[in-house]
């Protein structure tokens, strides 16, 4: 069972991409009109937005949580996310791991944070919001995915052109398997914005000892970049006998869990999912399903902390 993003988004040449190219005009027009709108910028607190220009699977939420952990040591910080009915998984994770605010619009969240005397508000997603502006704009990429075929939606995976990097401050690149892809992405980013700060991130597995490597495992996920989940497990020598991939932010039904459990039984396998997916597992099934707990590691973290301290200072 495989439901995923169009494969042609990550191919350099595709007939489908060329056929859809005329429809990218709608995204271009929307982005242009959005850039001309007057947006609200708070004078009472500092705002950071952690977003992307590549749709899904770039690690925005783990990066937001990591930034919160660093910033809370120097300022009264909170994370924030606009309420979406189909994104409860990320909201639950943010609630569990951070001080968290949500509302139906990001401007409403900002107003709420001002009343609560929050000093730094870190938004998970929202770089393309047409109501508010941010003091600092951070962009996340996956080192293997890069910018895909480099085209705008729906011909490709980009919300904005790569040229939009001129207006951003920091880039986080999730380290992948292909160092050539990573280096090429860094060169491309620096070509469009020489002043931008670039940080490489990676995932470190926490408490992996609870997994028995001699057993077989079925894995399932509903995330933006499913191969990254399988990659971590393979790197840790987990025997994967089957994979079930659902759409990002999938709302699991009883039938879905029945299907997963039956598949695992057929393969005589145990079940592993992501922490993001595990928050949606019914209580009665939680003992039958394990989740992979990972922590985000930022290479050259001291440099990032120095940047944050300097720029979040009240005088700036």
Image (cartoon, rainbow, N blue to C red):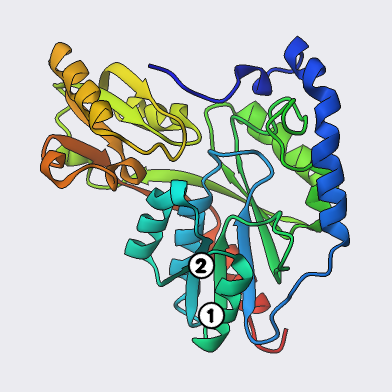
Question: Residue 117: image x %, image y %?
Answer: 52, 88
Q: If the image is split into quadrants, where does the C terminus sit? A: bottom right
Q: Which residue is mark 2?
A: 103
- Numbered label attached to residue 112: 1
Disc 1/disc 2 C-alpha distance (Å): 9 Å
Image height of 238 relative to 293, above or below: above
Residue in the picture at 74% in, 74% down: 40
The answer to whether 164 appears left or right of 97 in the picture is: right
> Can residue 298 be seen?
no
> Can residue 83 be seen?
yes
Which residue occupies the foreground of this view, 305 or 223?
223
Badge 1 vs badge 2, beta-carbon distance below 8 Å: yes
Residue in the picture at 60% in, 21% down: 6
Q: If the image is split into quadrants, where does the N terminus sit? A: top left
Q: In the rendered structure, which disc, 1 or 2, sits on the residue that comes first in sequence?
A: 2
Residue in the picture at 76% in, 19% down: 17
Question: Residue 249: image x %, image y %?
Answer: 44, 40
Dot 2, crowdedness within 10 Å: few (<14), some or many (≥20)? some
Question: Residue 94: image x %, image y %?
Answer: 40, 60
Image height of 193 relative to 314, above or below: above
Image height of 23 relative to 241, above or below: below
The answer to whether 163 appears left or right of 278 in the picture is: right
């Amino acid at each position: 069972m495989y439901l995923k993003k169009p494969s042609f988004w990550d191919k350099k040449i595709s007939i489908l991409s060329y056929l859809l190219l005329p429809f990218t005009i709608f995204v271009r027009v929307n982005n242009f009109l959005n850039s001309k709108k007057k947006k609200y910028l708070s004078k009472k607190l500092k705002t950071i937005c952690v977003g992307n220009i590549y749709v899904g699977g770039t690690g925005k939420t783990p990066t937001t949580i990591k930034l919160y952990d660093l910033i809370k040591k120097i300022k009264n910080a909170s994370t924030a996310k606009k309420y979406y009915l189909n994104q409860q998984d990320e909201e639950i994770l943010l609630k569990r791991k951070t001080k968290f605010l949500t509302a139906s619009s990001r401007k409403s969240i900002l107003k709420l944070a001002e009343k609560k005397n929050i000093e730094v508000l870190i938004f998970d997603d929202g770089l393309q919001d047409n109501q508010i502006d941010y003091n600092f704009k951070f962009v996340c990429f996956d080192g293997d995915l890069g910018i895909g075929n480099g085209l705008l939606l729906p011909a490709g995976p980009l919300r904005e052109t790569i040229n939009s990097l001129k207006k951003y401050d920091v880039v986080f690149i999730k380290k992948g398997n292909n160092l050539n892809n990573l280096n090429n992405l860094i060169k491309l980013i620096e070509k469009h914005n020489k002043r931008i700060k670039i940080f490489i991130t990676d995932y470190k597995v926490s408490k992996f000892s609870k997994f028995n490597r001699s057993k077989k495992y079925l894995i399932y996920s509903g995330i933006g970049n499913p191969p990254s989940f399988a990659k971590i497990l393979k790197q840790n020598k987990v025997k994967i006998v089957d994979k079930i991939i659902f759409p990002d932010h999938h709302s699991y039904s009883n039938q879905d869990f029945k299907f997963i459990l039956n598949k695992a039984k057929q393969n005589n396998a145990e079940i592993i999912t992501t922490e993001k997916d595990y928050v949606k597992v019914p209580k009665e099934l939680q003992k039958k399903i394990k989740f992979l707990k990972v922590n985000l590691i930022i290479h050259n973290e001291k440099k990032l902390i120095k940047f944050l301290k300097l720029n979040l200072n009240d005088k700036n």
